[in-house]
Amino acid sequence: MSTRHEQPAHHGLLPDQVIYLRQPIWRGAVRQDPKVAKGNPYISGEYIIGQLNRAFGFDGWDVNIIRMDEAEVDATGGRYRATYVCQVELVVYAGSRVIRRHGVGAHAMTSKNLVDVIANGQASAYTKAIKSAAITFGAQFGLNTVRGGRGWQNNTQNEHPMPPNLGLEDWRTAWLKAELDSQSSSEDFSDEGSSPRPAPAQAARKHSYPLQNLIKSEADGGPSVEQLSEVCRRLNAPSDVSADVMVALIKQAITSDLAGTRAILDEVMG
């Protein structure tokens, strides 16, 4: 007889998961570098993602990007400087429940390479947003390490706490078969009668055309050759050259006149 259920076997986090989340975080995960975060304890983004897999399973959580904005962009002295703000929704599947948490992360990046600024700035803001959302699940995600918290020091064992028994064959397969529509508004694993929390305010955008689109192909949402030609024409730059050359000319214009170039990009491509 199969142990799989036609309906999810439970409603909410498993007891083993709750026990795991209540344990102090592994001491080795907490870093204190005087050169980083003013020497305050912090947890790396890579460890947080690993913890999500340990606590909820590789297929037991998901992340939705709500917004990825350029909060600030500057180009002076031949160097690009940008601050990216990312807002995410962290989704955890707990039997017949869907737990949703929101997080916001920001990261400032400086480089001579525009691609590095975009790629690394966005990646770091995304990871920080995940950490911001995951910390609401408690000690295993660094809750008691912030603002002078010392709960992590209670874990004197030099090993990870025992991860939960997720019982994949028992309830995870059944969860995938379950009807999810009626559960889509579940916000937490407590206070079921309460109304869902509003999402945090969206970060403001200063420009309608993100600079990162310049490095995308037209099929992926990047500019067309006609759009690049029009931008170059308005910049009094050659427009009868290849697309790569036109992008390079636009990047050069950004360095010398950020505000004017951004205004043209917004008008032509926004």
Image (spheres, rainbow, N blue to C red):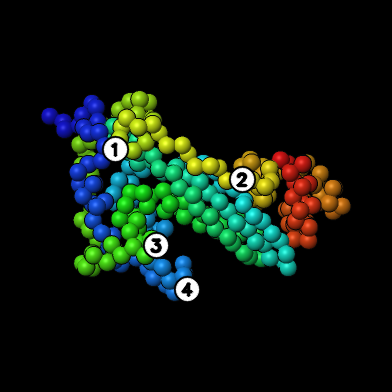
Percent of width and height locating residue 184: 38, 30
- Of circles 1 and 4, the one toward us is 1
Percent of width and height locating residue 41: 38, 66
Q: Please rate how many residues cluster around mark 4, counting C-alpha atoms within 10 Å: few if below 14, some from 14 to 19, many from 20.
A: few
Residue 39 drawn above or below residue 66: below
Residue under pointer 1: 190
Q: Type of residue at label 4? A: Lys
Q: Please rate how many residues cluster around mark 2, counting C-alpha atoms within 10 Å: few if below 14, some from 14 to 19, many from 20.
A: few
Q: Please rate how many residues cluster around mark 3, counting C-alpha atoms within 10 Å: few if below 14, some from 14 to 19, many from 20.
A: few
Give whichever of discs 1 and 4 has the lower sequence position: 4
| Quadrant of the rendering where the C terminus is positioned | top right
Label 2 sits on a secondary structure element that is loop
* Residue 53 in sight from this viewpoint: no
Residue under pointer 4: 35
| Label 2 to label 3: alpha-carbon separation | 27 Å
Residue 157 drawn above or below residue 232: below
Left or right of 153? Residue 105 is: right
Residue under pointer 2: 204
Residue 55 drawn above or below residue 39: above
Q: Type of residue at label 1? A: Ser
| Label 1 to label 2: alpha-carbon separation | 32 Å
| Label 4 to label 2: alpha-carbon separation | 30 Å
Q: Residue at x 53, y 49 (%)?
A: 86
Q: Type of residue at label 2? A: Ala
Residue under pointer 3: 147
